[in-house]
Image (spheres, rainbow, N blue to C red):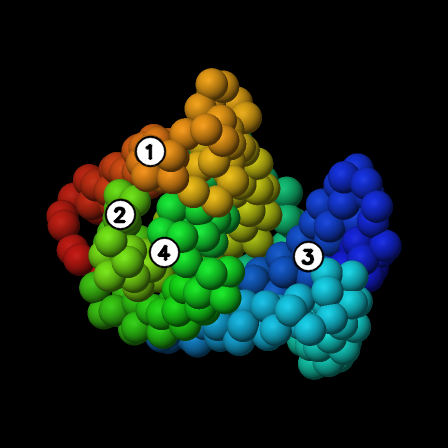
Amino acid sequence: MSMGLVLASCATKLWHLYLTQALLYGLGSSMYYYPLITLAPTYFDRHRGFAMGVILAGSGVGGLVMALVLQNLLDRYGIAWALRILGVWNFMVGIGVATVVRGQRQRGENGNGAAGAGGGSSMPNRSLMRRGTFCLSAFLQAGGNVVPLYYMSSYTVSVLLLPQSTSSLFVSINSGVNSISRILMGILADHIGLVAVAAVMVGSGASSDVNRFIAFVVMYGIYAGGYNALLPTTIMEVYGVENYKRVNSVMYFIRGLGLIFGAPVAGIILGTHKRGGKRWGNGGAGLGTGMGMGRGVEFLRKKYNDVVVYDGVLLMAAAVCVVYVRWLDARDKGRWRWKA
């Protein structure tokens, strides 16, 4: 991860970023994040939703702080040094985490001494993967989850015509709310069930009104944060603690595919643009610099609304899949209970 950031500071061509921030950082972050998210739930039997909410709230706090810090670094030192400083900081924190995290073995839920989530094979088997509806929901939710995060800043600058510092503030607000939501949703899940809470998702339209857009930033932080925090413990509930390790690996692979699918398609729908919609690339030929600022912003807002519809369809479809999984669980058990 640190190498990817530091080497990206030396990039002079686009393909340099593909190799550094995309490939190196992507591989490093996966190797770093996956063991943590696999080990953490195995330490808790009761109040697992609350525990994971607290643990994963750290990423929300990080987003809250780092969005503002990075904007300050960019303004003061430029892109290259901002990346180098971030790379060194990332290395120092990563080494600290690596020295204290330890794996452990747990007994199976049946108490027979079988290896639990902390042990056993990480390879999936066909019987587990046949319960593909939940995997599909993970794919769709991952694809839709990142779209607002990726385009929140560009929408703030290009359509709302606000400064870049304000867009960083919106990202920080979203991350802060996201962090609190992860804890509260974890507590709620411990009382009414993980899958029931995970079924709650929202989509929101792009708004030209700043106050309504802030409301969207806050609401999306609440619901998206809750889902992401509950995913590891929901996997345990759906597939059983003894299968957690193997299913978790596949689930995050599927979510990775969703990330690859979601944001690029949204980018194709949006096309290329400048502040105020002055110039368009794909799909906007003929609407060049001679177009008035008002018409340009309005046209750009419509393109963002197309992205919103696309993202809303992904998230609603994911919600339907999760609800269906919850219904299957109730059917198999012969009765409905909020907490499965």
Q: Earlier in the sequence, mark 2 or mark 4?
A: 2
Residue 195: x and y, percent? Answer: 29, 53
Confirm or deny contact between disc 1 and disc 4 (CB under 8 A). no
Q: Earlier in the sequence, mark 2 or mark 1?
A: 2
**Residue 207 marker:** 2
**Residue 226, quarter of picture:** bottom left
Confirm or deny contact between disc 2 and disc 4 (CB under 8 A). no
Q: Where's the C terminus, which quadrant?
A: bottom left
Could you tell me which secondary element the residue under label 1 belongs to? helix
User: Going 61% across and 73% down the picture, which residue do you hit?
Assistant: 72
Nearer the observer, 93 or 168: 168
| Circle 4 residues within 10 Å: few <14, some 14–19, many ≥20 | many
Nearer the observer, 77 or 119: 77
Q: Is residue 151 left or right of residue 67?
A: left
Q: Disc 1 to disc 4, how far (Cα)?
A: 33 Å
Q: Earlier in the sequence, mark 2 or mark 3?
A: 3
**Residue 29 marker:** 3
Q: Disc 2 to disc 3, how far (Cα)?
A: 34 Å
User: Going 83% across and 49% down the picture, which residue do you hit?
Assistant: 11
What amino acid type is highlighted by mark number 4? Ala
Q: Earlier in the sequence, mark 3 or mark 4?
A: 3
What residue is pinned by disc 1? 295
Q: Disc 3 to disc 4, how far (Cα)?
A: 20 Å
Whether residue 65 is visible, yes or no, is yes
**Residue 224 marker:** 4
User: Going 52% across and 22% down the picture, which residue do you hit?
Assistant: 282
What amino acid type is highlighted by mark number 1? Arg
